[in-house]
Amino acid sequence: MTLEESELQKLNAKVQTVGEVTSLLAFPVVGYLAYLFGVKLMLLDAVFLLIGALLLAPYINVVVRRREIAENENKSTQPTISPKVVFAGIVLILLFNFAIAPARIFVFNALKSLTRKEVIYGLLRSTGTLGSLAGVVGITLFAHKRKIGISKPLIVGMLFESFAVLLLGLPSLVSLFSGILLLNFGGGILNVSFDSLFQRIIPLKKLGTYRGIFDALATLIIPLSQLTFALLIEHGVDISMLAAGMFGLGVLSTAGFFILMCGIKKRGFTKEEV
């Protein structure tokens, strides 16, 4: 079965919505249980993980049919996406991740100068969860009705996150909460759209490879970025200037990815031809 972009977005957004709602409800419950039972709660965690794994077991051997190409089509004329284009997209997203990753460092640095920082941090986490939930619920509601596709929400999410980094570099409690809200709102939209993009343009037999490469590189890029900016802040570099620079880098990588997406769309391909 081949899904339209909007339908694919809707399905991925539903999955993300379930995860966000579960997190929103589970954190206070688990916190209270941890207060009561301490480390023994890890046993319950293991039981829940086992149950979740067993529920996914029936999907291991699901047969996925590859769409057949009509015999009268000339395969040599079918547009294709080269691995170079795919890796170019991955590099742009990683560059964007490098620009967005210092947001956490900016938040921790802002909290150092505040009183009751533990309470404020808890409120920031709740604000971020609500922002992420709003993003994925928005895609769930509008993906099919408005035919929003994949590329538009993806670009919008990247721009929201870029602007959020700029806000987090400002010395204001209002900008701190606004930045966290926009960062997670844009992140929710971006995560759903990025999952849909991978599933849309990469065939199933290569999906795990490309996604594994991206996740492995992101695991290196994000902490490297955070370490770099933590050192820069320790050496007295102005945070507002750093935030402005990362905002610019985020916008540039977004523009590059937008151009790449436009080029892919003009060629008109199916993922079987990647």
Image: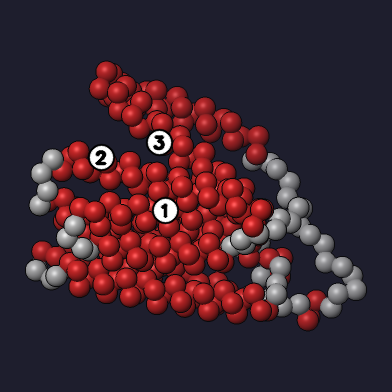
197 to 27, vertically: above or below: below
Whether residue 212 is visible:
no
Secondary element at tag 2? helix
Report the side of 176 relative to 256 (left or right): left
Q: Which residue is mark 2?
A: 122
Disc 1 residue type? Answer: Phe
Residue 180 image position (x, y, % from top left): 31, 53
107 lies above or below 249: above
Three-letter code for the amino acid on which mark 3 is drawn: Leu
Quickly name the residue at label 3.
24
| Disc 2 to disc 3, C-alpha distance | 12 Å
Which is more N-terminal, label 3 or label 2?
A: 3
User: Badge 3: how crowded within 10 Å, few (<14), some, or many (20+)?
Assistant: some
Residue farthest right in this picture: 72
Helix, strand or loop status at disc 3: helix
Nearest the eye: 2 or 250: 250
> Which numbered disc covers residue 114?
none
Mark sitting earlier along the chain (1/3): 3
Depth check: 72 or 10 in front?
10
Residue 115 at least partly seen: yes
- Which residue is painted at 40% across and 62% down in the image? 160
